[in-house]
Image: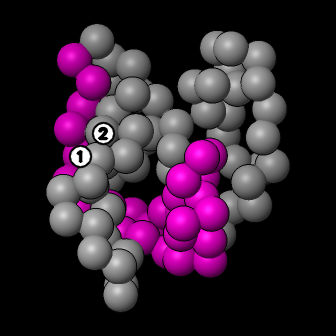
Amino acid sequence: MQPRFKIGDRVWVTGLLQDFYLGETGTVVTVEANRDGIRDLDLYVIAIPGKEMHDTKLAGFELIPAGVPPKLAPLTFKQSKMGFSS
């Protein structure tokens, strides 16, 4: 199964970390596919201009496509598997 995002995709951080990056658009730099094929658990390193991200890895459920309002973004792992909503 292909990762949800590919290198070069523009993304927003969501979930618990969104307050740290509110209004910031990141670009996917590396993708590490989940070995069990669970797309929401794929790991991504993103670059955000002016922010020191180093090699911080974010899971697929912590990212949404840039420009998509959070309520219209695809369901995250937490929402779809555990019944939580954002």
- For image coordinates 50% across by 74% down, the residue present is 25
The residue closer to the viewer here, 1 or 35, is 35
Residue 80 at least partly seen: yes
- For image coordinates 75% across by 61% down, the residue present is 69
| Left/right of residue 86 with respect to residue 33 in the rendered view | right
The residue closer to the viewer here, 14 or 8, is 14
Q: Position of residue 48 (x, y in %)?
A: 37, 76
Query: Which quadrant would residue 45 be assigned to in this image?
Result: bottom left
| SS at circle 1 | strand
Q: Position of residue 49 (x, y in %)?
A: 36, 85
Pointer 1 local density, CA inside 10 Å: few below 14, some 14–19, many at least 20: many
Pointer 2 local density, CA inside 10 Å: few below 14, some 14–19, many at least 20: many
Vertical side of 63 occupied by 59: above or below = above
Q: Are marks 2 and 1 in contact (CB under 8 Å)?
A: yes
Residue 7 at least partly seen: no
Where is mark 2, residue-wise? 43
Q: What amino acid is at disc 1?
A: Val
Q: Position of residue 67 (x, y in %)?
A: 65, 69
- For image coordinates 60% across by 52% down, the residue present is 14
Is residue 37 found inside the magenta-colored segment of the image?
Answer: no
Q: Position of residue 6 (x, y in %)?
A: 32, 52
Name of the residue lying farthest toward the bottom = 50
**Earlier-in-chain disc, 2 versus 1:** 1
The span picked out in magenta is 7-35
Tell me the CA gap for discs 2 and 1.
6 Å
Where is mark 1, residue-wise? 31
